[in-house]
Image (cartoon, rainbow, N blue to C red):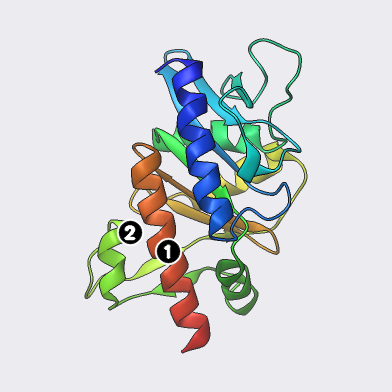
């Protein structure tokens, strides 16, 4: 995939999440893998209204989140965490949205949010019954290396999500579509447990 194609896909996905109210203001960011060796990602640019993103509002970054071609636009400040998630998990896409339910769930269960015996878990890639799924919760930090270390310490290959306390949700998949489906299912699951 080239940067232009990635930009079109990312702009479309951002518009979708903005319409759901999951990327308020300029919050949230998405990335998609451009290459694996070396690892390169296209990540949404910093400080822009995600509902108005154009295909050129993306930046190519390396595994540490550093722009491959410095200059405007700047990548999201969280590009380094996207790089770490992609490197460790092998993900083709990472979604970071500021949905309320996971943040509230993390307030109640700061050691991890446990889910089980819910049909929607199948859409998240897990079994609907007799499968305890724990979504890791890590403390927020403005230092992406600290957040990356916390992600790695809590990472499980069968649980493609991370809640950053008092911040938001990261979900990943093989591509943007799978990451979106997992994000939608996980948001439903989080709403269920905090509202039940």
Task: Determine if residue 80 is in view.
Answer: yes
Q: Position of residue 11 (x, y in %)?
A: 54, 35
Q: What element does badge 1 sit on? A: helix
Say which of 3 and 161 sits in front: 3
Kindly give the residue lying farthest to the bottom in the view shown: 196
Circles 1 and 2: CB atoms closer than 8 Å: yes
Q: Position of residue 33 (x, y in %)?
A: 44, 26
Q: Position of residue 101 (x, y in %)?
A: 56, 71
Say which of 169 and 2 sits in front: 2
Say which of 75 and 86 sits in front: 75
* Of callouts 1 and 2, the N-terminal one: 2
Does 59 sit above or below residue 144? above
Q: Is residue 68 left or right of residue 143?
A: left
Task: Determine if residue 152 is in view.
Answer: no
Does 178 sit above or below residue 60? below
Q: Residue at x 60, y 61 (%)?
A: 21
Q: What element does badge 2 sit on? A: helix
Q: Which residue is mark 2?
A: 124
Q: Is residue 40 left or right of residue 79?
A: left
Cα distance between the residues tagged 1 and 2? 7 Å
Q: Position of residue 121 (x, y in %)?
A: 30, 67
Q: Which mark is residue 27?
A: none
**Dividing the picture into quarters, in which one does residue 164 lie?**
bottom right
Q: Residue at x 72, y 46 (%)?
A: 26
Q: Quadrant of the N terminus?
A: top left
Does 194 sit above or below residue 98? below
Q: Residue at x 68, y 37 (%)?
A: 145
**Dividing the picture into quarters, in which one does residue 81 lie?**
top right
Q: Which residue is mark 1?
A: 186
Label 2 packing within 10 angstroms: few (<14), some (14-19), many (20+): many
Q: Residue at x 50, y 18 (%)?
A: 4
Does 18 sit above or below residue 176? below
């Amino acid at each position: 995939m080239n940067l232009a194609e990635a930009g079109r896909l990312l702009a479309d996905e951002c518009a979708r999440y903005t319409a759901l109210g999951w990327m308020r203001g300029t919050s949230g960011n998405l990335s998609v893998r451009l290459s694996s060796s070396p690892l390169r990602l296209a990540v949404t640019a910093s400080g822009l209204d995600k509902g108005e993103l154009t295909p050129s509002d993306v930046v190519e970054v390396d595994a540490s989140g550093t722009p491959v071609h410095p200059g405007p636009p700047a990548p999201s400040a969280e590009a380094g965490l996207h790089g770490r998630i992609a490197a460790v998990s092998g993900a083709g896409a990472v979604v970071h949205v500021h949905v309320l339910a996971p943040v509230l769930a993390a307030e109640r269960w700061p050691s991890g949010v446990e889910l089980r015996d819910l049909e929607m878990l199948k859409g998240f890639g897990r079994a609907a019954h007799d499968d305890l799924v724990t979504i890791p919760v890590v403390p927020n930090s403005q230092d992406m290396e600290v957040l990356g270390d916390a992600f790695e310490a809590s990472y499980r290959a069968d649980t493609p999500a991370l809640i950053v306390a008092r911040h938001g949700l990261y979900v990943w998949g093989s591509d943007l579509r799978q990451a979106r489906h997992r994000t939608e299912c996980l948001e439903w699951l989080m709403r269920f447990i905090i509202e039940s």
